[in-house]
């Protein structure tokens, strides 16, 4: 049998199988698989390195380096060098707070921007010319303030997601704890972020978790963790701000205690993972009315924490079922493989493909 040449390497970050605070192990760490972009099937996943709670991953300028947040109480950031299908840890620094859960590389600041969920902090970790974080830790730690009406979940700020604006002028921080999407500018000389206030005030008690811009940059779609609502924000590029123009149930059936997770935009489709109902819902963007529900793709497992759209396929991390699932564009299942507690899926870029599976 001839092996397909259309293989896309995927790096998988994981969450503690036994829950936060448990000892590292039981498959926890960085995993790798390859997606056959012709058939929608995955190669057998393999653990590349064991590290604590690498729940989100990111690349910087050097495609041979990967950064992983370690979502633990003593939050950390691990830098790994990819080579020959493997990975080695080359640095570990403090994330500047507790339970870091998302990370992006900001080219303008030549730094990693990390949000720490439990401590409600935003950190800027500068890297040197070789892409290594400075060992003294964050250059800047910003303590966010605010709260919301949901007991136990919104007693303080809980930033969950970071994304740059489409024009690259600002960085947005989605704060689940205070129902605000915060806006930050940059001080390029000091290599620091500058608090520029609220970009969007979300509905009270919505618990915004993740967000994604439309391809034309005119809309921002926000997944509300509480109430399982999908919110559409009209975005004003000139003022780097927006307002909510529509809020609809992500899934029209009774969701019970379901919570929204990750959200992506694929053409005119908006895809949202719904934990609890354990579906990937598809909405169609509407230039006049926000989004319209199209269909729900039922998944072969529970707790779709994250997903990635790769060419004609959507790969879903089913955290509590210890599985990755692949769907085609119609929502049909093409493959399922076992990975302990997957939390994040990041495709390798072409220049890092020397780290592909052996």
Image: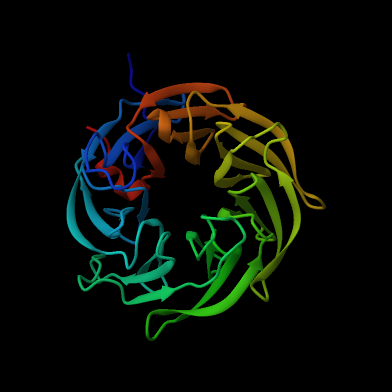
Which residue is painted at 31% across and 57% down in the image?
73
Q: In the shown orientation, is residue 7 left or right of residue 85?
A: right
Q: Is residue 169 visible?
A: no
Furthest residue in direction bottom, as rendered? 189
Find the residue positioned furthest to the top.
1
Q: Quadrant of the N terminus?
A: top left
**Is 254 above or below relative to 30?**
above
Residue 17 placed where, x, y %? 32, 36
- Which residue is nearer to you in this view: 170 or 162? 162
Quadrant where the C terminus is found in the figure: top left
Q: Residue at x 40, y 44 (%)?
A: 344
Question: What residue is drawn where x is 56% and y is 55%?
Answer: 151
Across and down, in percent, residue 25 comes to 22, 38
| Residue 39 position (above or below residue 82) | above
Q: Residue 37 placed where, x, y %?
A: 45, 30
Which one is in front, 204 or 128? Answer: 204
Q: What residue is drawn where x is 37% and y is 30%?
A: 322
Question: In this rendering, is residue 183 above or below 208?
Answer: below
């Amino acid at each position: 049998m001839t092996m397909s040449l259309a293989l896309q390497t995927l790096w998988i970050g994981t969450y503690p199988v036994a829950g936060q605070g448990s000892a590292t192990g039981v498959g926890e760490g960085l995993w790798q698989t390859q997606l056959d972009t012709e058939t929608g099937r995955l190669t057998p996943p393999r653990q590349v390195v064991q590290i604590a709670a690498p729940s989100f991953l990111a690349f910087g300028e050097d495609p041979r380096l990967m950064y992983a947040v370690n979502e633990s109480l003593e939050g950390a950031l691990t830098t790994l060098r990819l080579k020959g299908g493997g990975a080695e840890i080359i640095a570990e620094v403090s994330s500047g707070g507790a339970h870091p859960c998302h990370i992006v590389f900001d080219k303008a600041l030549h730094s990693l921007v990390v949000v720490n969920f439990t401590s409600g902090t935003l950190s800027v970790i500068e890297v040197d010319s070789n892409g290594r974080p400075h060992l003294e830790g964050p250059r800047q730690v910003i303590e966010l303030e605010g709260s919301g009406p949901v007991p136990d979940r919104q007693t303080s700020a809980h930033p969950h997601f970071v994304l740059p604006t489409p024009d690259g002028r600002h960085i947005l921080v989605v704060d689940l704890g205070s129902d605000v999407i915060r806006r930050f500018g940059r001080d390029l000389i000091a290599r620091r972020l500058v608090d520029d206030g609220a970009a969007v005030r979300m509905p009270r008690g919505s618990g915004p978790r993740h967000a994604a811009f439309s391809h034309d940059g005119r809309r921002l779609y926000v997944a509300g963790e509480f109430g399982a609502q999908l919110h559409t924000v009209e975005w004003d590029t000139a003022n780097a701000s927006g307002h909510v123009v529509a809020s609809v149930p992500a899934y029209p059936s009774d969701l019970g205690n379901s919570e929204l997770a990750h959200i992506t935009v694929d053409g005119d489709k908006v895809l949202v993972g719904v934990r609890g109902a354990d579906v990937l819902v598809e909405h169609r963007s509407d230039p006049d009315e926000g989004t319209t529900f199209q269909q729900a793709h039922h998944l072969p497992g529970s707790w779709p924490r994250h997903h990635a759209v790769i060419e004609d396929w959507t790969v879903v991390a089913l955290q509590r079922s210890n599985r990755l699932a692949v769907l085609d564009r119609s929502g049909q299942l093409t493959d399922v493989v076992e990975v302990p507690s997957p939390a994040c899926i990041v495709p390798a870029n072409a220049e890092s493909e020397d780290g592909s599976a052996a």
